[in-house]
Image: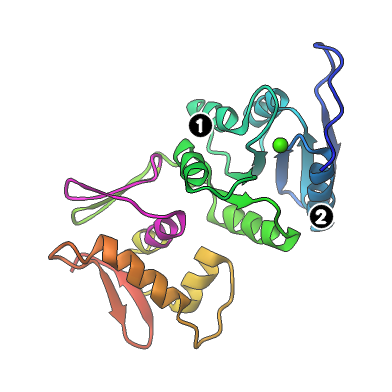
Amino acid sequence: MVAAPAQSAANAPIAVRIVRGHANVHILIIEDESKTAAYLQKGLRECGFVVDVTHQGEDGLYLAQTRDYDLAILDVMLPERDGWSIISEIRRSGRKLPVLFLTARDSVQDRVKGLELGADDYLVKPFAFSELLARVRTVLRRGPIRQSEILIIADLELDFPRNRVTRGDQRINLTAKEFWLLSLLARHTGEVLSRTSIAEQVWDMNFDSDTNVVDVAVRRLRRKIDDPFDKKLIHTVRGRGYVLEAC
Ligand code: CA
């Protein structure tokens, strides 16, 4: 990776380059590695997104708080103001801007920290552009999930602002995917969701009809959400899919 050019003056103009594409989807990239930033900008621009890039955290935070973006791609390791601090500030100010964060280490602590601070998804470097694009599309389709929203189904409670799940008075720790899978089912309470629909919305992929990826994920989720409790909430509808409902 190539280092970003050093900032020579404290009063230097905000380091942002604006590239106009054809679509109405505006993405902000905050990434100090100029080579990575340029690569992302070029690829996303070719896909029709309108992309702004800044190499500095402080400028990134300013832009995120003052302009209307549909998504921010945020590198965690930035000089001076890091990605954690940026996302915390964005959330503290109440903005629902979806944030996809980039981390150099695939550590559980990093991922959990990012998601707890309010990120919508993460990607571990190095990554393929196709993977980033898939995440971007998924986050955009899902829309901001930092709503001050709490869903309650029977004794199950999903606290979206805090990414927190409880049943009764028991806190349930879920992985990011499990949380999204549960969120999807909970947002469609009483509605049967097909495996294909779940696969598309949670993994942004089309699975072959004979794959059991969704089944495995649901089984894992049930182990945490349903198995320890008498009342089961996730139900299998033979030949159709899954439904979350209280009765
Ligand atoms: Ca960096």
The residue identified by callout 1 is 91
Identify which residue, 75 or 147, lies in the foreground. Answer: 75
The residue identified by callout 2 is 43
**Residue type at the position of mark 1:** Arg
Q: Is residue 18 visible?
A: yes
Residue that sits furthest to the left in the current view = 230
Residue at 46% x, 59% y is: 177
Residue at 65% x, 27% y is: 61
x and y percent of residue 20 in the render?
85, 44
Quarter of the image where ligand 1 sits: top right
Above/below status of 35 relative to 224: above
Above/below status of 228 relative to 56: below
Classify the position of the N terminus by image quarter. top right
Residue at 58% x, 53% y is: 139
**Label 2 or label 1, whichever comes before in sequence order:** 2
Question: Magenta part of the protein: which range?
Answer: 161-183
x and y percent of residue 55 in the render?
77, 32
Image-based side of 64 in relation to 91, left or right: right
x and y percent of residue 4 in the render?
83, 32
In which quadrant of the rendered view does residue 101 lie? top right
Above/below status of 115 relative to 220: above
Classify the position of the C terminus by image quarter. bottom left
- Disc 2 residue crowd, few under 14, some 14–19, many 20+, Cα 10 Å: some
Q: Secondary structure at mark 1?
A: helix
x and y percent of residue 233 in the render?
23, 66
Residue at 30% x, 79% y is: 236
Q: Secondary structure at mark 2?
A: helix
